[in-house]
Every structure is written in structure tokens, then in C-alpha cells.
Amino acid sequence: MRGIQGAGLILFVVGMLVFTVLPFLSSYRLSEALVRDKVKEIHQEKLVELLQPMYGQDYPSTHAFLSAYASHFDAYNEGLKAKQAWDQVIWDDYGFALAKAAGAGPARAHPWTSLALSIGLVVLGGVLFQFSGSGHTSLAHTGVFHSSLMNRGVLGMLTGTYLIGFYVILYWFPAYLSPLVWMVEPIAQFLSGGPASQWFLYGLVYTLAIGVMGIRMVLKYRDNKYQQLRTASVMFFQTAFAFLIPEVLLLLNKPYFDFKNIWPLDYDFFYDYQIDTFLSSGGVGLFMLIWGILLIVIGVPVFTYFYGKRWYCSWVCGCGGLAETVGDGFRHLSDKSMKAWQWERWMIHGVLALAVVMTTLTIVNYFSSFSLLGQVTNQLHSFYGFAIGSAFAGVVGTGFYPFMGNRVWCRFGCPLAAYLGLVQRFKSRFRITTNGGQCISCGNCSTHCEMGIDVRAYAQQGQNIVRSSCVGCGVCASVCPRGVLKLENGPEEGRIHEFPILIGNNSIKLRS
Amino acid sequence: MGSRHFVIIGNGISGITFARHLRKGDDQARITVISGESPYFFSRTALMYVYMGQMKWEHTQPYEPYFWKKNRIDLKQAWVKSITFESKTLVFESGETLNYDSLVLATGSKPAFFGWPGQDLKGVQGLYTKQDLETMEAITSQPIQRAVIVGGGLIGIELAEMLTYKKIPVTFLVRESRFWEQVLPEKEASLVQKHILDHEIDLRFQTEIREILSDAQGNVRAVVTKIGEEIPCGFVGIATGVTPNVDFLKNTGLAIGKGIKINAYFETSVPDVYALGDCAEFDQPPGPGRRTLEQVWYTGRMHGETLAYNFCNKPVAYQPGVWFNSAKFFAIEFQTYGLVSPEPLVGVQDFFWRNDPGKVSFRMTLDLEGKILGVLNLGFRLRHEFFDRAIREKWTGELVMQRLANGVFDPEFFTPYHVEIQAAFQRQFGGTIVPSKKSFFQKLFGLNQ
């Protein structure tokens, strides 16, 4: 078993190295035909002219190619901006599309081999590594504070830095990833009939990560059906709803749509171009629009009333899915202090308020043909997309796993989590029940709560845990050595103990 | 009440519970908590998890440092050397003094050592204090060929689990003929023993040590058993129970038996001096089937709650309710509610069920009229509130079985053991129980065994 684990680790590391090196193994040569092929008609003539000096030149690296591109393109755009000729400025970024089209390299020549040697080895190695053959669920959390990776040691720092770097490149410098996109091109063609983008690459990697680390969860919690079922659930929703179905929709010439993504997490659901897409795609588009609205106004409150926000956050959501699988080993790094809780409430509800204001403005504008603060709305969109959608949800949300735990985004930033949380706190049957007087204040529950809830503070006074942030992962109940905690859906009456009483002392009945 | 100065010696669960509840009921009192062991209250029960890298030290502290300031509970880290009751003065080891109006002794207990030759060697220790954790971490960070644990109870098995985490081979010596004989009936003990053996632990019964041998540097080298076998080892964990930590109070005029003698109001023989928790010994057992020394977490907490109440209200006698306890043996959880004797008793009927692979069991004791006295369960969880009520209201075994689905506290989707337990009860006692139905999910995922 140790041998298999060791082999898995080696394969994983080799795969990661190949994945990291591949983007550097590429060269570029641009032609007029390629520019005509990749650039929108309205910009075509201008770009064909601007990029003239690049045609036929050999660029030995992505960086060299993009620098050359930028020197021509940016000079033109900056000139227009200086003249305040805003309507002539080219806002589209053709860097990725041109790099992808103009490049050559092993990943393009041999996409399947490259894929097998990078992502393939990572997946294979990752799966093999999970079969350590040891342990019982009760040992699932031993040693995490002795681990360099899981306790902010050198490995943790490196992992976090790598993840942050990956997200920064993905969001703001995607052209550098184009060699990696080449190798997933055949899969995209097969699924959607169209070309692969950096988002397709990301979706594939994301889904595989949840798959491999989901296997880890199922093995780690081999005696815990709750953990296994919810892990299987997030694996299913990621694979089918977030990854496959949207691609197949494209194949069928329908709008790309993730049926489980809900506004305000899906913050551009009401953007004008989205609404136009829905309304111009016939019955299917209309269904998507209505489905999305029904989830917001009926799905969230009804499901959350019966089951708590966990139905979404730890059973369905993609961000939650990644946090609960890839991020599981970092859950204990969340900050449990009162101060962190105060920050959390301001931040998450602040983001919710921002999303609501932005969306309201957007909808008003949609019906008034952008007469009210049209320019502000656009700026709001780009601010939100940059600060919340990319920086917070992506770079911080995942990149900070090894620093601040696996639910940074879900806890401090996700506006849908805030909405679900409000329902959970004020109108739900869900609670974590404390088992009478059995708590020994050991603190395992609080230590391993990914949302930073001080579970023990409630358990030790015999009080049910009713907190808006609880995603119902169930790990507090699993890690408790005395059988004190149980996630339950039950009558609203008596759910919130304002005056909890610890069972077992007949001398007095007092408030803890 | 004015600003009476309450001084509490000991910042464990009983002393801290007292201090917290006193502050809730009395805004004026001046409260000082003294501990030499650690500046802040921590959960002793979590020491093993710090050792196993499952928690950090800070996680063992249930309250953040600001809590004490906010609640005006003064914390003083110092060891008390002596107490002069006449002048109500504490003298610290530093020579400093402190006066009190009311003194609460909550000094806890300490591992019991039985005078074995070599018991003071380096590498021989109990597991009770923060310092014990630190010495154990230091010693076992060196390569050790083997560790020996003496004593077959809860601390013994915790030590076994901790050492196993560090992959140190363990020999586990138990004086009795089975594990935790004072509490576990034979069938439960054998279930746990099998689980211990599954962890490759050298478990030996009816074995006592005669002496502990030293190497040239004063470190432990081996233990010798009563039959003369020498077991080489680099660490000896003493887990033969605890004894009240009262040495520094002897010959001070305070009445002391095994612990500090108290009545049901926690009053000692000296006016304005009270004792709580592990260090206290009641003059009468506080309830039927209970001991005069109550040395578990829960009772320490209840003592603190009750005494604080008494200072803020009309005093009541300490009167614990239905007994309960819990523990964990490696992966197997243990709970008990009410009275379950480890040996069969006349006038008590026993119902026992265990599952096939043998990691889960349920025992219910009944009086001759078939009314529940207590339960003891391994490997699954039962609801405290349910069994507390069943035992207080003297439900019949049949009624308990009928409602058992409500008494299970396992997580959702877990195997519904109660269905089989109901069937087994019916086979043994007859009656007309309608067994619970498996839910849709339980059927769907084949959750039976």
C-alpha cells in the first residue's frame, strides 16, 4: 500500500510539472489569414493593418508573442483613449484567441499525449495516492497540524502561491494558458462541437479535481454515509450540471447554461446580454430564464426551510464542491475568533447588498433602455466582475485555501450564501442539535468547522447551533468524540434555545 | 453582598464554571481564579488531540482571552504554597500573598502512583496536566522502541491511541481480567478489547508491574512485571486512576479524607471555604448508586453550577440527576445513561444486542417489572434527553423500544441499528412493538448492517 501511495505521489508531481512546463513549450507565427479568422468583423480591417509587422515573424515564447501584439495594439488603443475617442477604442481582448490560433508546440501537435502526461498523470497519481489503505473515519483529522501542506508550512505556502498564480493568469492573462487549451481542444470539439477556451480548460480541471478529491473524501469517510452521499452529490452536480450539460447545450445550439447556478452567485444572470440570449433562444431560453427566477424566489426559500442552506452549499454548489473535496484538508485553518465573525457578517452582507443594487440598476436599465445611470451600471458590472467575481471568488476563494481555510469565499463573500443564510437563520427547520449534557468542551468541532463557527460555545451550554453561515457539512458531528452533535431538520418550535438547560443536574435549572 | 472577594484555586471545568455562573448572578463580586498550570482555562479532555496533531493548544481553550477581561474574572498564574484559614490568606510560591472572603478549592486530581520502585524516573508519567503533555511530546519525539501503559481505563486507552499515532509499539498492562472492569460488562469489554488488538497493541490482563528499571542516565529502560518478566521500553504511561490533588492542604486544619470533605452544599470543615470537582469528597453519596468522589467532567461542571447558584440564590443541596457518561476507545464511541452494572445483579434483567461485525452494541438494564434502569451503548449514539426522560419517568422496556427511533442520535443516513435492536428485544421479551420502518433512503442504499 505504501508503494502504491508513493508511486501515486511521483505520478502526481510529474504530471504537475508537465502541466506547468507545457505553456513554455510553444512558439508563434501570425498571419493575416489568422487575424481575419479570429477577429470580429468590425475590428478586422484595423487589426489586420495594425498587426502587419508581425506577419511571418517567429516568436519563440508566449511572452514574446504577446509583447509584440501588445506593442502594436495598445499603442493604437492608448492613442484613441488619449483623444477620448471612446467609441473607437477596441475593448475586446484578442490576445488569447490569436495566441491560440498562431501557436505551435507539443501540446498542439500531440494533444492526447500531452493531456495524458499532464492532467492524466495528475489524476492517476491523485487517485492512487488516496489508497493509503489505513485508517478509520475517527482518524480522519489526526496529524493535520503536523503537516507542512495543511498547517501553513512550506508546502502549504507553495501550494497557495501556485493556486493564486494560476487564477491570476486564468482571469487576466489567459493567453499564457493557450498551450494548455490546445490539448483539451479535441474534448471540447467532441462535447460542444466548438473550440476550447480557457474556461473549458478550467471547467475540465475543476471537475477532475472534484472527482479525484471526491474519491479521497469517500475513502476518508468510509464509515460515514452522510459524508459519502453529499460528496457523491457535489461530484454529480459538478460533472453533469456545471460541466457536461452546458457543453452539450452548445452542441445543440442552445445557450450555455448551468441549471444549478443561482443569482446572486450567478451575478450576470440578469445582465442585458444574458436576458437577450434567453429571449432570443426560443422555448429553451425562456425556460432557462423562468427556471433561474423560480430557483431564486421559490427554490432557495423552500429547500432552505426544509433542509437548511446545506442543500445547496454542501450538496449542489460548485464552489462548495471544490471546497469540500480539494479544500477538505484545509478546513481547520478558518479563523474561529469573534473578530472574524464580525468581519464575516459585514463582508458577506455587504457583497449581497452590492449584488442586489447592481442587479436592480441593471434591470431598471434594461426596461428603460439604459436611461438611468447607464454608464454607472456598466462600470458597476466591470467592478463587480473584477473585484468579486474574479478576485474574491477565484483568486482569494481558492488560492487562499492553504492560508485561511477552504471556505473563505463562501464565508466572507458569496452573496448567495448570505441569502441562503438569512433564510436558514430566520425561517428554517434545520439546526445542529446538542446531545443534552454530553459535551466535554474538547473543541474538535470548532477546530474543524470550515466556516469558523465556534460550535463548542453552543454545545457546551446545551444550546442548538443555529447560525446563518453553517453549510451543514457535518464534520463537527463526525469529529466529535462523545456523540454530541447531530444535524437535524425538525419543528421550528424549540429550535432556538434562548435559555438552554444542560441535562443532568437536578439541583437547579439554570441558564448556562 | 457588596464586593466580596471570591478566590478560586484551580481553573479547570469546576472552578471556571463556578466563576462564570457567579459572574452571571452577581455583578458586584470580585472574582480571582488561580492556576499554576496554565494562564487560561483549557479542556483537559483535548490533550490527546493536541498530541495527535488534530488540534493546536489554542483550540483547547473554550474562551478567547478577551472573555475574562470582559467578565471581570481576574486570572492569576501562580502556585499556591499554603493557606492560612484564620486570616483568610493565600501564600504563593513566590512569597506573594492574597486575601479572600470566600475560597473555592477546585484543585482537581492527579494521576495515582502506587509507590513502584523507579516511578520517578524520566519517561514515567501520567497524562493529566499541560506539563504532562509537554513532557510526553518531548520524550516521544526521540525514537522509542516501545512504550508500556499501566492501567486499563480511559487514560490508558487514550495513551495507547496517542502512541499508536506516533507509530510507537505499545504494551498495555491491565491489572484486572478485562478492560475497564469497573464500568464495562464482559461482552462490551471483549468488544473493545478486540478493537484494541486490531490496532496491534500488546494487551495483557491480570498483569501488574513490580518495578521500573533505569538506565545510566536516569531514564526508564524497562518495566518488570509481578511475575518477573522484563519489558524493555522508553516510556511508561501511568493510568491507574486519579486521586484528589490535596497534598498542599494536608495538616492545615481542613478536614481531608481521600479528598476535601464537603457536605451537599460544598461546604468544607472551615467556614467560607468550599470545594468542588475532582478534589472534593462528599460526606454522603449525592444520589443512589453514586460515589462520594465524583471525578468526571460533567460532575465537575454541575458542582460549579450549583455552588454559584447557591451564592446568588437561596442555597440548595447538590442533587445530580440521572447518571450519564461517555468516552471513546480508538474509533468506538461509548455512552451510558442511568445505572448499568458491570456485573449481573440480582433483581436486574439485562437486554443485550450486538451487531454482526461486532463494533456496535446496546445494553438495557430493567428492573423485575420491566422498567428501564439504564443503557450502555457502543459504536452508535443515543439521545441524552430521550433516555434521561425514559429513566426518570420509569418507562417500560417495551415503551423505550417502541420509541427507540427517537432515541437514536446517529447522523442522517447512518445504519438504523434500532430496527434490529427492536426485533431482538421482541424475541427476548415478547410484547407488541411495532418495529420502525426503514426510510426510503435507508432502503435505497441498503443500510442495514
Image (cartoon, rainbow, N blue to C red):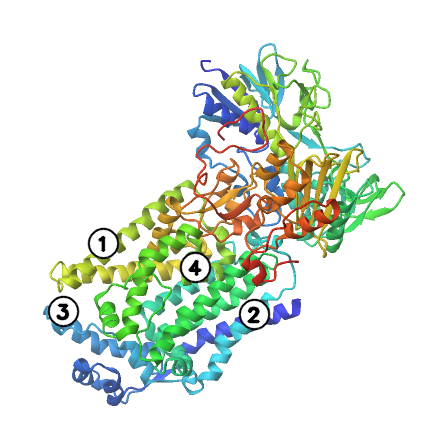
Give the mark nearer the N terminus: 2 vs 3. Answer: 3
Residue A157: x percent and y percent?
Answer: 46, 58
Give the mark nearer the N terminus: 2 vs 1. Answer: 2
Q: Point out which mark residue A147 bears.
A: none
Q: Is residue B272 left or right of residue B110?
A: left
Q: Disc 2 designates what residue?
A: A127
Residue A142: x percent and y percent?
Answer: 60, 52
Q: Chain of mark 2?
A: A
Q: Chain of mark 3?
A: A
Give the mark nearer the N terminus: 3 vs 1. Answer: 3
Residue A68 to residue B420: above or below: below
The residues bearing labels 3 and 1 have C-alpha atoms spaced at a distance of 29 Å
Residue B131: x percent and y percent?
Answer: 63, 37
The residues bearing labels 4 and 1 have C-alpha atoms spaced at a distance of 25 Å
Q: Chain of mark 1?
A: A
The residues bearing labels 4 and 2 have C-alpha atoms spaced at a distance of 21 Å
Q: Quadrant of the C terminus of chain B?
A: bottom right
The amino acid type, in three-letter code, at marker 2 is Val
Q: Disc 3 designates what residue?
A: A81
Q: Do tag 4 and tag 2 residues touch (Cβ < 8 Å)?
A: no
Mark 3 Cα-neighbour bin, 10 Å: few <14, some 14–19, many ≥20: some
Residue B172 to residue B14: above or below: below
